[in-house]
Image (cartoon, rainbow, N blue to C red):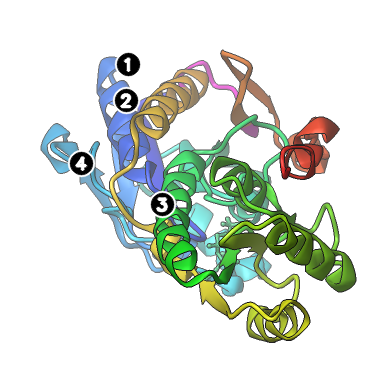
Amino acid sequence: MKKIAVLTSGGDAPGMNAALRAVVRSGLHYGMETYGVRDGFKGLVEDDIFLMTRTHVTRIINRGGTILGSARYPEFKNKATQEKAAENLKRRDIEGIVIIGGDGSFRGALALSEQGIMTMGLPATIDNDIAATDYSIGFFTALDTAVSSIDKLRDTSFSHQRCSVVEVMGRHCGDLALYAGIAVGSEFIITPETGFDKALTIKEVKASFDRKKRHAIVVLTEKMTDVFTLAKDIEKATGHETRATVLGHVQRGGTPQAFDRVLATEMAERAVELLKNRENNQIVGLEGKEIVHREMASALAMKKHMPSKRYGLVGQLRN
Ligand code: ADP
Ligand code: F6P
């Protein structure tokens, strides 16, 4: 294979640039040209494609966001746009493409492979919701951001003897809330996997204040419930002032931490090597310490596994 392309798609994640750098540099290593596509599948359809050189990816390994830009582009579900995208690649003799994004982006990749383009998926999302990898690029950086923000909230909650209810991202996956909740020593976590039980949440926060703690922290995944209403309910039931904080998109930005850079680099190198060997339709992942790859459709059908003990830790260590 002489020419490949690369794009970043869906919600951006810290470490996408490190992945882009490694795709371009690995391409050069294997004697291939790498074309960058701006703004995800939108750029592919609109023919916003350019040859990337070594200098395009200089000094980006430590930069948040994605230098190529990313987009949510629902139009890519239409066959006509998929055909157009494939045409734009074929006209340049580009045979393969590395798609850096989440599971939505991989569905786009599948569609593209049906149009005769060889595709490789690199999991990059702060949600860590892709079962085919232990960790996705960006998860640990977002987790660090959530943890350092909640540490700050704990300072002020302690001073004022308050409860802090903190909403983190994750879409349908509770990993960010679960790991952050453990890392900050929270009183209670609420995730899609645990479900939301208002009475139990209030009971645990109240029990914590009854044990003479000066503050309480509840961490929850977005969309589980309205955090501002929950804060009011906790305040009413416990008599302790309660404040709600939605961390929001701050979790998506910032310098990728070291592990995300290493993961991005290793996964990207593997993806390019696979394309060089004319492998098609794979998602690269991390399994233990090994970089692995799986056929895309079956990888997308996999269910995430979390050791059940990890969910119990917060309750077990509450006293
Ligand atoms: P993520 O990749 O982070 O999960 P999205 O779910 O928004 O983010 O998906 C990113 C993009 O992938 C979408 O905006 C769309 O362009 C493309 N995409 C998502 N689902 C499909 C699908 N079923 N068929 C084709 N393209 C899709
Ligand atoms: O998938 C990443 C993510 O940040 C989710 O955690 C969140 O639900 C969603 O994207 C937010 O999307 P947008 O940036 O389009 O508002």
Q: Quadrant of the N terminus?
A: top left
Amino acid at the residue labelled 1: Tyr
Regarding mark 4 in the picture, which secondary structure is present there?
A: loop
Is the residue under label 1 in contact with that under label 2 (CB below 8 Å)?
A: yes
278 inside magenta stretch: yes
Q: Which amino acid, mark 4?
A: Ile
Residue at disc 2, secondary structure: helix
Residue holding disc 3: 145
Query: Which percent across, then down, holds residue 158?
Result: 48, 62
Q: Which residue is mark 2?
A: 27
Residue at 64% of width from left, 56% of height from top?
104
Sequence order check: which comes first, mark 2 or mark 4? 2
Residue 252 located within the stretch drawn in magenta: no
Magenta residues?
Answer: 276-282
Q: Total number of numbered labels?
A: 4
Label 3, label 2: how many angstroms apart (C-alpha)?
Answer: 32 Å
Marks 2 and 1, how far apart at CA:
5 Å
Labels 3 and 2: the sequence-earlier one:
2
The residue under label 1 is 30
Q: Position of residue 76 (x, y in %)?
A: 59, 67
